[in-house]
């Protein structure tokens, strides 16, 4: 039986439940096709359920547990309870008007992560952005958005940032190309406020900020672009790498592919300024603006 830590989000509960169902099915030597037939569904739906990428019906899970030979009342009750918890809507669902479905998945994972590692090439990490900087980025990406929509998007960012000071705040490792802090989004004063905010954030015990300096002339491991690697407190939940695109996103969870990103992140950190040297560089940029 999998234990879910307090504070785990519904997204992680779905992943955990799917993983448990896959293990139970494989232990009985039952194919996805046969499992799908037992609940009047396709093989592909069973695959999506086992990956935690769809919601669960309690009746379907109950039928699958019977098929897999799970008759112990305590085990069945625990897994069926996980179904109900997995289907609870997160706070971010209330922002569906400004939050695309593919990004809702990310926010749910972010809310549940114990470690968030990212490499940024364009903007300051979203969780570390100051208000006016965020507003400038929103207006750049949505130039025709009315004022009330901009405020909604800003409110969404505020709610995401509460994660940094929550009881179960994750460790944040934000690696950024130095060009990120040299671009003056919103103008001089906006960038001054953002840099000061970034310096302050970097002093928090759960936040590490590192800059890949402009003077670095070797081959950058980050040449492939921005990505985020999420690690979760539950040992049964694999790391997920998030790669955002213009109209969607990729969620990578295959171990061999995630391992490649893990190597890239380690190389980026080794090539970047130390957290202390990064803070000195940020202060130097701040003085020059």
Image: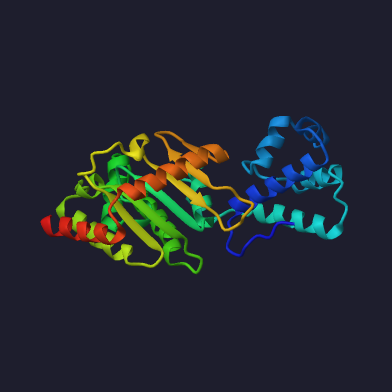
Q: Is residue 139 left or right of residue 14?
A: left
Image coordinates for residue 42, horizontal then vertical, percent: 73, 30
Q: What is the tally of numbered marks visible in this picture?
A: 0
Foreground residue among 282 and 136: 282
Instruction: State whether residue 11 is above or below residue 255.
Output: below
- Residue for point 78% across, 41% down: 25
Q: Give the residue furthest to the bottom.
A: 167
Image coordinates for residue 115, horizontal then vertical, percent: 48, 56
In this orientation, does residue 240 appear?
yes
Q: Is residue 193 left or right of residue 6?
A: left
Quadrant showing the N terminus: bottom right
Foreground residue among 149 and 134: 134
Residue 190 location, quadrant: bottom left
- Residue for point 52% across, 55% down: 113
Colour scheme in use:
rainbow
Foreground residue among 104 and 27: 27
Image coordinates for residue 165, horizontal then vertical, percent: 43, 67
- Residue for point 52% across, 45% down: 240
Instruction: State whether residue 200 is above or below residue 95.
Output: below
Q: Is residue 223 left or right of residue 165?
A: left
In this orientation, does residue 91 appear?
no
Residue 46 location, quadrant: top right
Q: Give the residue furthest to the left.
A: 288
- Residue for point 87% across, 56% down: 72
Residue 140 location, quadrant: top left
Q: Is residue 285 left or right of residue 58?
A: left
Quadrant showing the C terminus: bottom left
Image coordinates for residue 209, horizontal then vertical, percent: 33, 57
């Amino acid at each position: 039986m999998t234990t879910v830590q307090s504070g785990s989000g519904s997204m992680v509960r779905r992943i955990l439940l799917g993983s448990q169902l896959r293990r139970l099915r494989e232990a009985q030597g039952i194919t996805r096709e046969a499992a799908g037939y037992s609940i009047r569904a396709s093989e592909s739906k069973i695959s999506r359920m086992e990956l935690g990428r769809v919601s669960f019906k309690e009746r379907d899970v109950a039928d699958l547990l019977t098929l897999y030979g799970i008759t112990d009342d305590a085990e069945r009750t625990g897994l069926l309870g996980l179904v109900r918890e997995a289907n609870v809507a997160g706070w971010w669902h209330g922002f569906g008007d400004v939050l695309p479905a593919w990004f809702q998945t990310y926010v749910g994972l972010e809310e549940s992560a114990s470690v968030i590692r990212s490499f940024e090439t364009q903007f300051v990490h979203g969780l570390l952005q100051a208000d006016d900087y965020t507003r400038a980025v929103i207006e750049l990406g949505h130039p025709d958005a009315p004022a009330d929509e901009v405020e909604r998007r800003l409110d969404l960012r505020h709610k995401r940032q509460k994660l940094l000071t929550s009881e179960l705040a994750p460790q944040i490792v934000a690696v950024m190309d130095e060009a990120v802090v040299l671009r003056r989004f919103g103008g001089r004063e906006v960038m001054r406020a953002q840099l000061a905010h970034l310096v302050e954030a970097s002093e928090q015990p759960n936040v590490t900020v590192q800059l890949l300096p402009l003077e670095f002339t070797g081959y950058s491991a980050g040449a492939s672009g921005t990505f985020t690697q999420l690690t979760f407190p539950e040992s049964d939940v694999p790391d997920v790498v998030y790669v955002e695109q213009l109209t969607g996103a990729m969620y990578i969870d295959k171990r061999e592919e995630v391992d490649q990103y893990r190597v890239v992140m380690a190389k980026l950190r080794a090539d970047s300024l130390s957290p202390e040297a990064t803070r000195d560089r940020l202060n130097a940029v701040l003085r020059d603006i």
